């Protein structure tokens, strides 16, 4: 297979992997929200929080309201955003709404699955938080207030982050009056912890290893990086401040798995090399995240 054929095959494999991970994360998100948030009336904001509040007032199932609200927002997004609206977000939003709606019939619940509200709060934060982080990692969203943010970003100069935080805070505040102080306090804790969990999971997903290798002979190491690990590197010459000896410095970035392989190889091939390894979660360029 030639180089172009290999690239096409690699691109297809990446798309399949992305589709599988997006689907799994969406299922995980819907399950976590239905089982842990809906049954405890935990209101963290967004469409889920609004649906819970409306459900308490109108007695319409929250799962049905999530489906209706997300469908309405999708229609508005297509009208306002047109072709700029990402297909991945449409897929995730529709699938999420359908799963939430289906769970109401497949797994009917009339209350919390345990008598430990703190335990359920932890899962209500962690499970959807990890799923949302995975979805955001692939530049998609599960609909709801994310769509409103996209519309506002296009037509106004409003600080979207601040606006969404205020909207979610208002939803959480309403939970005190609708569901009582205890549930309101739990919802407030979840609201404060949600973004922290998402940010940390995203950082963990994106984390790479940034190498600075100071050595005498860079060729074996560079050959290993290019031929075996299929990465690239930058090499420049340097002079030791104390000894005055001339050295080569190799600069490269690896995934965590590749970093272990490279470190092991350097220790064997260049035992006198000086290696500096730094964690980084923002790598933009060929072989990593798309250039923006």
Image (cartoon, rainbow, N blue to C red):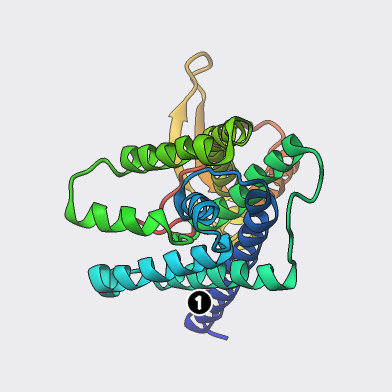
Q: Name the residue at 81% across, 41% down.
A: 115
Q: Name the residue at 55% across, 40% down.
A: 194
Q: Is residue 209 visible?
A: no
Q: Name the residue at 54% across, 52% down.
A: 56
Instruction: Compare residues 34 and 161 and report the one nearer the observer.
Output: 34
Q: Is residue 98 visible?
A: yes
Q: Quadrant where the N terminus lies?
A: bottom right
Question: In which quadrant of the rendered view does residue 211 lie?
Answer: top right
Q: Quadrant where the C terminus lies?
A: bottom left
- Residue under numbered circle 1: 7
Spot the residue most to the front: 58
Q: Say whether residue 82 is left or right of residue 31.
A: left
SS type, badge 1: helix
Instruction: Compare residues 96 and 274 and report the one nearer the observer.
Output: 96
Q: Say whether residue 226 is left or right of residue 85.
A: right
Q: Say whether residue 113 is left or right of residue 124.
A: right
Depicted 264 relative to depicted 186: above or below:
below
Q: Position of residue 195 (x, y in %)?
A: 51, 39
Q: Position of residue 122 (x, y in %)?
A: 70, 39
Q: Position of residue 72 (x, y in %)?
A: 37, 69
Q: Residues within 10 Å of mark 1 (few under 14, many from 20)?
A: few
């Amino acid at each position: 297979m030639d180089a172009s054929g290999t690239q096409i095959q690699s691109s297809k494999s990446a798309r399949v992997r992305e589709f599988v991970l997006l689907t799994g994360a969406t299922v995980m998100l819907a399950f976590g929200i239905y089982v842990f948030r809906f049954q405890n009336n935990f209101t963290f904001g967004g469409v889920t929080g609004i649906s819970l509040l409306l459900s308490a007032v109108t007695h319409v199932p929250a799962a049905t309201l999530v489906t209706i609200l997300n469908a309405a927002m999708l229609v508005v997004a297509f009208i306002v955003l047109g072709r700029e609206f990402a297909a991945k977000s449409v897929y995730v939003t529709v699938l999420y709404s359908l799963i939430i709606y289906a769970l109401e019939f497949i797994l009917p619940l009339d209350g919390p699955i345990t008598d430990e509200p703190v335990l359920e709060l932890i899962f209500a934060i962690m499970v959807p938080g990890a799923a949302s982080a995975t979805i955001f990692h692939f530049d998609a969203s599960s609909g709801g207030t994310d769509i409103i943010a996209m519309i506002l970003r296009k037509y106004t100069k409003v600080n979207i982050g601040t606006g969404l935080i205020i909207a979610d805070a208002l939803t959480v505040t309403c939970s005190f009056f609708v569901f009582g102080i205890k549930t309101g306090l739990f919802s407030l804790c979840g609201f404060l912890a949600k973004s922290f969990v998402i940010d940390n999971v995203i950082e963990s997903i994106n984390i790479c290893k940034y190498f600075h290798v100071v050595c005498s002979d860079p060729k074996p190491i560079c050959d290993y990086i290019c031929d075996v690990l299929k990465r690239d590197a930058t090499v420049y010459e340097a002079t030791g401040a104390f000894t005055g000896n001339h050295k080569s410095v190799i600069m490269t970035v690896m995934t965590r798995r590749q970093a272990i392989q490279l470190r092991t190889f350097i220790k064997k091939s260049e035992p006198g090399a000086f290696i500096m390894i730094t964690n980084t979660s923002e790598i933009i360029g060929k072989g990593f995240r798309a250039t923006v």
